[in-house]
Image (cartoon, rainbow, N blue to C red):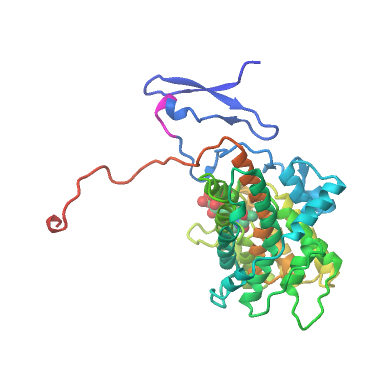
Amino acid sequence: MAEETVTIVDNRTGNRADLPILQGTEGPSVVDISRFYKEFGLFTLDPGFQSTASCESAITFVDGDEGILLYRGYPVEQLAEKSTFLEVCYLLLEGELPTRSQYDRFCRTVMQETMIDEQMRNFYKGYRHDAHPMAIMVGMMGAFSAFFHDSLDIQNPKHRELSLFRLIGKLPTIAAASYKYSVGQPFIFPKSKLGYIENFLRMLLKVPSAKFKISPRLVRAMEQIFILHADHEQGASASTVRLAGSSMANPFAAISAGISSLWGPTHGGADEAVLQMLREIGSVDRIGAYIQRAKDPNDPFRLMGFGHRVYKKYDPRARMMKKIAQDVLSELGREDDPLFQLALKLEEIAHDDDYFCRKGLCPNIELYSGIAQSAIGIPSNMFTVVFAMARSVGWICQWMEMIGSKESIGRPRQLYVGASCRDYVPLHRRP
Ligand code: ACO
């Protein structure tokens, strides 16, 4: 079959070129514009990547119109219902679900990597006591490359594998320690015989003076939250990881860049911002005023937990997250939780509002994430850290895929609108 193409004609010169149309397994076809500059001497401009695929990927697929999210072809709802986080990690990394023995070996290897170097604990003392745990996470992740010289050769598959196990295994330990430091509590050491999620919750919530006990339903809810956050194809943070890693930087440096990108309130930081917003709104009768503010083009206020670049009808993760929040609250006998009730009402009002419908602003994963996590006992400044831990597996997969491909260094072009070339004027000659 003849290759499908799109013909571009430069009306100024009459130059024409047939650009190949590439067909993926799902989603819209893609025009290959890599020869565009050679053919026309022109760059293309697409700020914010509204219409540009930045890479070829076989990991995760999002259909924003239909509200579909697939990890290696599996719907995220099925994985959140039936799978475990470490099984999802295996799936994302290897492309297939593991056999029982592959799964057991994978879990064992991850849990053997949960300890951190004693010297790393000293690093925490360098931070102010009130540092945000995300600030500590960025630094600690970057510091990994100072400790693991034996796994920094990114061309060596054994090094890459060692790095990924270290990352997945140690992240809960540095994350929990970031929080413990910020509240002045002693660090709790990992327990590798526990499950991945229970071990994290124990390190985060236990204090040495009391026994730690948590309901298995809450652990399961947390596991589901991790699964829903595990990957989301080329979001800002994953793209940051790919771009940072494209210079052949080591994976810890690239993941540290991803954590920084995630932190912003229009990305992963939204979960913390949602809770702040709900507290500020305070009661149902004040929702109207905030909706008006969100619609006012002169007011920078945005309704946190609403809107997404890709999902324009609904975010499948938001539905799951709402159900998780409901389950957690019912387990705790707190179905009438005021913030949850407020979020439900906000969703209802926004759903019926013309502005939000017209702009395709539906609830995103973050609307109910903070409510669910907060009920489980996660402090609000740790929500984005939880997101970073869960998403790290996605980032590692994206990084590994990029390293294994023929992609060269990421180097976007620009439409330059600054001063044209001019001669330097010595200081004494300037007016
Ligand atoms: N509240 C009010 N208006 C909004 C919102 C919102 N939450 N989101 C977008 N809009 C409006 C914008 O003002 C803009 O209006 P205009 O066309 O009149 O200028 C229009 O909708 C399009 O907005 P963009 O920012 O161009 O849309 P984009 O797809 O780039 O942004 C984003 C997506 C950043 C998530 C945005 O919807 C937002 O800021 N939401 C609130 C923060 C949030 O919840 N982030 C979490 C996202 S999920 C995640 O990252 C895991």
Q: Quadrant of residue 70?
A: top right
Query: Which residue is located at x 58 percent, y 67 percent?
Result: 136
Q: Position of residue 379 (x, y in %)?
A: 68, 72
Q: Residue furthest top?
A: 1
Work out which quarter of the rendered image holds the N terminus and state it: top right
Q: Position of residue 90 (x, y in %)?
A: 76, 48
Work out which quarter of the rendered image holds the C terminus and state it: bottom left
Q: Position of residue 369 (x, y in %)?
A: 71, 62
Q: Nearer the viewer, residue 219 or 245?
A: 245
Q: Nearer the viewer, residue 323 or 248?
A: 248
Q: Residue furthest bottom?
A: 209
Compared across the picture, whether 333 is left or right of 231 comes to: right
Compared across the picture, whether 417 is left or right of 32 comes to: left
Q: Which residues are magenta?
A: 39-43
**Residue 362 appears in the figure:** no
Majority secondary structure in the magenta region: loop
Q: Nearer the viewer, residue 23 or 170?
A: 170
Q: Is residue 59 above or below residue 272?
A: above
Compared across the picture, whether 377 is left or right of 308 comes to: right
Q: Position of residue 65 (x, y in %)?
A: 68, 42
Q: Is residue 40 magenta?
A: yes
